[in-house]
Amino acid sequence: MRSAFTFCLGLFLSSSSALAQAGYLQLPQTVSAGAAWSLPTHGAGQGVLYIVGPGQVLKRTFRLGDTLAFSPGELYNAGHYTAFLVSPSATESTDFDVTAATQPESISFLAKPSRLPVSLQNGISGVAYLFDTFQNLMMNPVEVSFQLFETGGAVQERTVTARNGVAWVRMNSASRAGIAQFRASAGKVTEKRVVQQVPGDPCSLRMTAHLAGRRIALETEPVRDCSGNPVPDGTVVTFTESYHDMETTVDVPIKRGVARIEMPANNGAVISVATGVVLGNTIKWEGGK
Amino acid sequence: MSRNRNLSRKLLPPVCALVTVLLGSGFQQPSVRVEPAGSVGPRTMEKQTQTAVIRDYLLAWQCLSDALRQNRPELVDANFVGVAQQKLTGTIREQKKLGIQTVYQDRSHDISLVFYSPDGLSIELLDTVEYEVQIRDGEKLQGTQNIRSRYLAVLTPTEVRWKVRVLQAEPQQENTSGLRDGTWTGQHSASPLHPISNAGGSR
């Protein structure tokens, strides 16, 4: 019984001694993406080091006891890695992290929509994902500045701290129609997008009538939205003439800001005008009086 | 009745073969827990969207595992896009060049959806994954490591499914795998992990 115990103790000590002789992996807990770093090893004989992760794999054959040097840019994809050191006596493994750089090098910026009506509350959204030079998502908090440069020089600006690599913002569209530039900036990087702000729906509608030969010439005043922006050409205006039991309807696209049409001159006819959900004035034709 | 029996006889061999292949390959469903998505913003997430995103994300892990095990970069295209696709494809090409294979077996996922963009064009999730990674050089198994790490994934909608655009592990303050500097694991050993509870569905 005693000899058996001695044998087991001897076996345990001998195996511990084998472990102690093996080269230990002394990896840093984190390595910066793309940075140069080194890994001292211990022991004797030939060893193979594997560094594996979904983002990258490396394999190095070396002499145990040497210091392994990794040049800049060799390990550049951020993430979690496992290092396996295979020596003649044992295999060791440990894991470590490769971290993204602290300054962004590129912004993936999504601005939506690219075209929208003026004076829309929270109508524009901007989402910015921040990446370092190796296309690693930057997970540390970084301030992102969103700016919307409107036609006429007005600027809306918001600063947001990115969390988990993303920052987002909502902004109002301007009251003046035109091209607006939407920018996202972080560190030295700026990304620009163009947002076209178009006039909203017509706000009011008014027409005038006069005799043109044997017909009535109808013409609207310049059609504008509620912010005073001219409604785009092509917007349809509907003229309706009611005379006894007869009704004549004509759809006319706006040209150069106004809609024009000639209709039969019937004494006692009632003429109305509308566009979208806006109803304009009504004229009762009394022969031009 | 006899027709049914004939059908069973015809179907049995392929089913058995499939079961054998699955058992032989150590196929194992990971346990999945999903945090309630109530606080995800800024866009409100519909239940169907959440289900689809989780399903496609878990499929992406399966795809990652298959592609890295078989060294087939073309498998990546089905579930990855953009940066994630490029990086994963690059890893597989490098593996082929070095003559190595890695086997990733995900054991559990603890997923929380953290961001749904206002335009609906991206979803970000955090996933604490427990998985095993094996390294094979040629035909020889060189080592195995059990890992617990938190991954951040950005998914974007494509024609028919959500695809992973970014898949990146967060740096850990503490190594939670239980194996740190100088720990000898042996060629076939695996460190014990404490499995998380399976409160959600599994794929």
Image (cartoon, coloured by chain):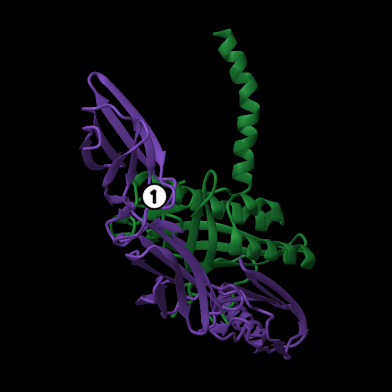
Chain colours: A purple, B green
Res. B41 in view? no
Q: Quadrant of residue A164?
A: bottom left
- Give the camera-side residue of A177 and B118: A177
Query: In this rendering, would A46 be left or right of B126?
Result: right
- Give the camera-side residue of A10 and B131: B131
Local crowd size for mark 1, using a 10 Å CA cut-off: few (<14), some (14–19), many (≥20)? some
Give the residue at x 67% y 87%.
Answer: A21
- Give the camera-side residue of A9 and A229: A229
Q: Quadrant of the N terminus of chain B?
A: top right
Which chain is mark 1 on?
Answer: B
Q: Which residue is mark 1?
A: B50
From the viewer's perspective, is residue B194 above or below residue A85? above
From the viewer's perspective, is residue B15 above or below residue A126? above
Q: Position of residue A49 (x, y in %)?
A: 70, 77
- Residue type, numbered disc 1: Gln
Q: Quadrant of residue A198?
A: bottom left
Query: In this rendering, would A123 be left or right of B55?
Result: left
Numbered disc 1: secondary structure: helix
Q: Position of residue A285 (x, y in %)?
A: 23, 33
